[in-house]
Image (spheres, coloured by chain):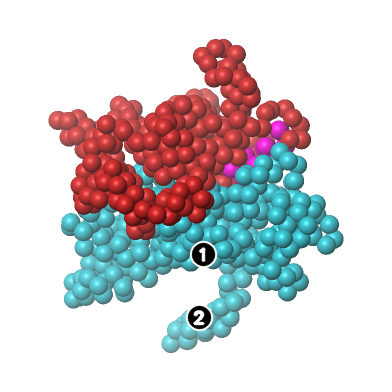
Amino acid sequence: MWVAGYLLKRIAFFFLIVLTAATVNFFLPRLSGQDPIRERMIKQVQSGSAWGKGIEEMVEVYNAKFGLDRPLWQQYLTYLGDMARFDLGHSIAFYPKTVKEILREALLWTIGLLTMTTLLSFVFGTFFGALVAWARAPLWLRSLAPPIMTMAAIPYYLLGLIMLFVFAFELRWFPGHGGYRIGTIPNLSWRFFLEALEHSILPALSILLSSLGFWAIAMRGMMVTVEGEDYMTLAEAKGIKSSRLFFDYGLRNAILPQITSLALAMGYVFSGALLVEVVFGFPGIGTVLFNSIKGVDYPVIQGIVLTIILTLATTTLILDLTLPMLDPRIRRQT
Amino acid sequence: MTMRSNGNGAAARLNNRSPLLEALGYLRRNPSLAIGLSLILGLLLFSVVGRLLVSIEDASPLSAPPYQAPSAEYPFGTDKVGRDLLAVMIVGTPLTLRVGLLAGVLGVGFASLLAFAGAYYGGILDAVIRLVVDVGLTIPSILILILIAIALRGVNPTEMSLIVAATAWLWPTRTIRSQVLSLKERAYVDVARMSGMRGREIIVRELMPNLIPFIVANLVNTTASAILATIGMEALGLGPTSHPTLGMTIYWVILHAGVLGGYWWWWVSPVVIIVLIFIALYLTSVGMDELANPRLRRSV
């Protein structure tokens, strides 16, 4: 019985998030009360590519064409319909390319980069955090804790700038810009994959190093709590091997909240990674976002906002649905 | 009788120590807080002293030759359009702190209001607050901020604080609310209720004083996230355009490929200052945590 209720609640929450995202996406840009068509026409007149005559008529014609003359709630409903079909409209800067076309490719790059770094950072950070809390861990390892935890307080892209300078400019070990070499056409070959991998190393390393501390801090706290439990003392008194005590008794019990926070952390990692991509000119969502802000390409910006939220909401939903399988305690609560 | 006068004497002696000395004594026992606060103080001092030595008008374009490496005349070098980077840092550092602090205060203030009202009275108000917070925290705030900023186009620093505050209240609302929930079950709250205190009185006189350290600790965290968001927006080209800021310098570096161009001084000074700000706030927050909740030891 609990399964159906839990499932229903999670799925309803998913749709609520998507609806909120679409609503925010529709209303926030309209907050300023600007008239996008008139603004664009005036810009055209100023740049000399159109005459000032008949501007009012043109504004009206375009407003009717884009449905901007209808009442706001009708526009909103139309917009929601478009979003339900995932019709994000056309880019202004790269007309007639659709927003979907632009985002599809970028999203692949971003998801590739983030899945890799998040998983690695989760594994290494969690393990490191557990070791730091473990009194029997070697001293050199525990002395790494302050720098790594402090690094977690620094935005990812600042580390990116430093990495770019050291490894791409000074040492020239790795390429410093883009996702592949200039002149290469993206394809599905082994060689292209290696080239992309080579270009991803620096951005991935920046995100990895600056996000390790986040997991380590959380894990250390949990591990300290678990170490104080009675069953740990008992296990130790029984003479259980230290490594078994660490993995089976400590780590295994302390790790569950980490998996829960994975869902929450995804959003944080996503926003941090946006600017890392920009620093390295990595062809993902972040770079597209940066360029569309520069080019005032509203449809693309809105498309990105919706896509990211949709991606995150889906990831959260999947995590929420798999979590009860891992942790019997959650099953009992809900 | 003698016992009591002795006790009073000891208390009086303790009270006689000036609050300043007492604070300094506490800082010695809490090095994270001490280092964090002195770093912030140092950054403010840098800006105050800097204003006396350097003309801040040099922070605008064309006040120096472009692309000058650090020298006696321009200790931090100059950028592509001839801003004196030392002047930019002197203007930008306190500006960043101010924008973040204002957003933090607004965010935590609003959050406390919602958290106390929601958690104490419960019911439908609490349910709505909880739902809004849950949904809001799933959506990365930077996306909301980007939408607001592009709609407004060209903001000043105060408006920037207001924009950032629009999402800054979500996290503190959640944490403060959960604290109030556990606090209101304590026996002394029951006693207050039974002795005839009303809801608002209990919140203001019984609950709030107990949570002030916790709220201040939250303020530090919220300010840090607000600064993170502010600099991120500026680096995306969405910050205040009328003032030179730290994030905007990063924006120009990225836009003109300053790192691969070899102009290291262009990005080193903003990066160092931003890193110092975040380390300072992180240490302050660790120290504050210890102050707010001595049982929780997580000193670095």
Name the residue at 20% across, 47% down. Answer: A74
**Residue A226, position in %: x, y?**
44, 39
Residue B11's disc is 2
**Residue B182, position in %: x, y?**
30, 57
Q: Which residues are magenta?
A: A157-168
**Residue B132, position in %: x, y?**
28, 51
Left or right of A76 in this view: B278: right
Residue B37's disc is none
- Please state, as top left, top right, bottom left or bottom right, where the N terminus of chain B lies in the image: bottom left
Q: Find chain A in the image and tell me its colour.
A: red
Front residue of B42/B286: it is B42
Foreground mark, 1 or 2? 1
Residues behind callouts 1 and 2 on a single chain: yes
Q: Amino acid at mark 1?
A: Pro
Is residue A247 visible from the viewing direction of this image?
A: no
Q: Is residue B27 above or below residue A282?
A: below
Residue furthest to the top: A190
* Other residues around mark 2 within 10 Å, as few (<14) / some (14–19) / many (≥20): few
Disc 2 element: helix
Queried whether the magenta region covers residue B226, the answer comes back as no
Q: Which residue is mark 1?
A: B157
Give the main secondary structure, helix, strand or loop, of the magenta stretch.
helix
Indicate which disc, 1 or 2, sits on the residue closer to the N terminus: 2
* Separation of residues labelled 1 and 2 (CA atoms): 47 Å
Instruction: Tell me which chain appears cyan.
Output: B
Give me the chain letter of mark 2. B
Give me the chain letter of mark 1. B
Residue furthest to the right: B72
Q: Quadrant of residue B76?
A: bottom right
Q: Quadrant of residue B28?
A: bottom right
Q: Amino acid at mark 2?
A: Ala
Is residue A290 visible from the viewing direction of this image?
A: yes
